[in-house]
Amino acid sequence: MTSDKNKILILNKSNNQFNFILKYPERILPVTFFLLCILGGLLLYLPFSSHQGISFLDALFTATSAVCVTGLSVVSLEDQFTNIGQIIIMLLIQAGGLGIMTISSIVFILLGKRMSLAHERTARYIFEVESKKDIKDSLLLIFKYTFIVEFIGAIILSTAFSFIKHNIFTGLKYGIFSAVSAFCNAGFFFANDNLVSFNQYPIILYTISFLIILGGISPAICITLFNLFRKKKIPLISLIVLYMTIILILFGTLFFFISEYDGVLNSLSIWDKINNAWFQSVTARTAGFNSVDLSNINMGTFLLMVGLMIVGGSPGSTAGGLKTTTVGLFFITFWNTIKGRDNIVCNKTIRPDTIQKAITLCVVYFLILLLTILMLLTTQSIPPVKLIFEAVSALGTVGLTMGATTELDGVGKGIIIITMFLGRVTPATLLCYLNTKIIDSRISYPDAKISLT
């Protein structure tokens, strides 16, 4: 009897030691992602994951890039890693894309188990729902949406790669991996030149680009867009995401086509130029695939791609960046301010605290970006343009590079590892933290007069 009591006391003491994490949603997310990065790094460091062995720093870099669905890599996936290592990377991408809370919650549902109160509370904040039923519905929607889209994409890509490579096994390998990588907006691919060798195959470019778009729009928003065909009302957030996505893709395609017509697109036919301009516009927002050599782009294209990487994808998706809704809110606020109106759009009022959260997120994002650029410029002997591009790509979890990744020394790799991690967990963690703060609206103070000129 005494022994049982001691076991209970030890168990309770053990649980109390982790309460400082488990009780706070804003702490669970970064801790779980951190542990997954470390676990992934250890697995990739083991002998069975690589042909000739790699350093732990390179293994950790690859694992962090996979978990944070970035796509930057300091080693060749095809040359360095075995089939087991490549499968581990794909699983890390899938886990990072879905998120640890999503996976663990799905497991509880499938096993018929009940989530703990701390787990349920965290899930409510992360998925922004009110009840346990809403959590279950959201999770099942994410699960079905993810694997149906990836399955269809894998079939199309596997068939295409099998014909191109004249090898069914290679086709399946390339198709399944690239479907997961594209939907999760990771940008990893086996070939050393990414998709440059396939830039004249529209079926591959458009399949991957639509997987990127569907992965960059959250399942909930994507489902509500079907209301367009049912002549039903679409939620405001879905409208913002839809308009921002269309505008960014079309503008990016047109600009890239004009800017690089005689540049990196020069050797391609007119239709291949259009196809690759579209592809790079889509992938620049968050995915990290490249079908042309980005090391030779001009400054106009450089600024375009930096802007697209900063904007990123949509909330609740696998994408990184500031998110289309955040940028959309700024444009709406700007336009309403010019017109002298309150923040009203589509007969809906945007709450002031939503705008405040968007501003806070932007300030934190740009502070991290500035600090990253300063550290890279101070420690690396690489052209500044390449380093700025690398920093924006890492923080936006995009994965595009102008060639700086393989030139980084140990310090540079460490900086990029931290930046990729922060880019993946900071937005959700910050919003979880801000959502837990309760402001007493009953307290009011005199208005402060602050000059802006």
Image (cartoon, rainbow, N blue to C red):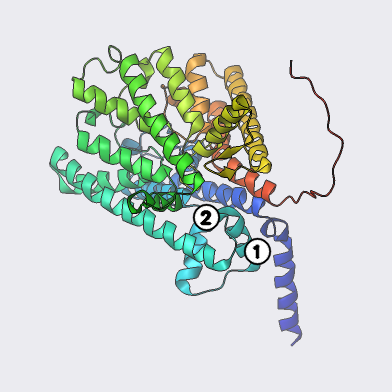
Give the alpha-carbon distance from disc 2 to disc 1, as whole Å: 15 Å
**Disc 1 secondary structure class:** helix
Tag 2: residue type? Ile
Query: Around disc 1, counting alpha carbons within 10 Å, would you say few (fewer than 14), some (14 to 19), or many (20 or more)?
Result: some
Q: Nearer the viewer, residue 429 or 362?
A: 362
Give me the disc on residue 100: 2
When the figure is inspected, residue 321 is found, relative to residue 159, above or below; the finding is: above
Count of number-bearing discs = 2
Would residue 36 be found to the left or right of residue 174 on screen? Answer: right
Picture coordinates of residue 207 (x, y %)?
27, 41
Q: Of helix, strand and loop, which one carries label 2? A: helix
In this view, the residue in front, 261 or 193, is 261
Q: Position of residue 25 (x, y in %)?
A: 65, 54
* Quarter in which the C terminus is drawn: top right
Q: Amino acid at mark 1?
A: Ala
Image quadrant occupied by the N terminus = bottom right
Q: Residues within 10 Å of mark 2 (few under 14, many from 20)?
A: some
**Label 1 belongs to which residue?**
118
Expressed as whole percent of the image width and height from the top left, the position of residue 3 reads 73, 82
247 lies left or right of 373: left
Earlier in the chain: of badge 2 and badge 1, it is 2
Q: Give the residue at x 16% y 39%.
A: 165
> Could one spot residue 319 in this view of the protein?
no
Between 277 and 421, the one lying in front of the other is 277
Q: Quadrant of residue 399?
A: top left
Q: Residue furthest bottom?
A: 1
- Note whether 201 is above or below 31 in the view shown: above
Residue at the spot 42% in from the left edge and 14% down from the top edge: 300
> Residue 20: image x %, image y %?
73, 57
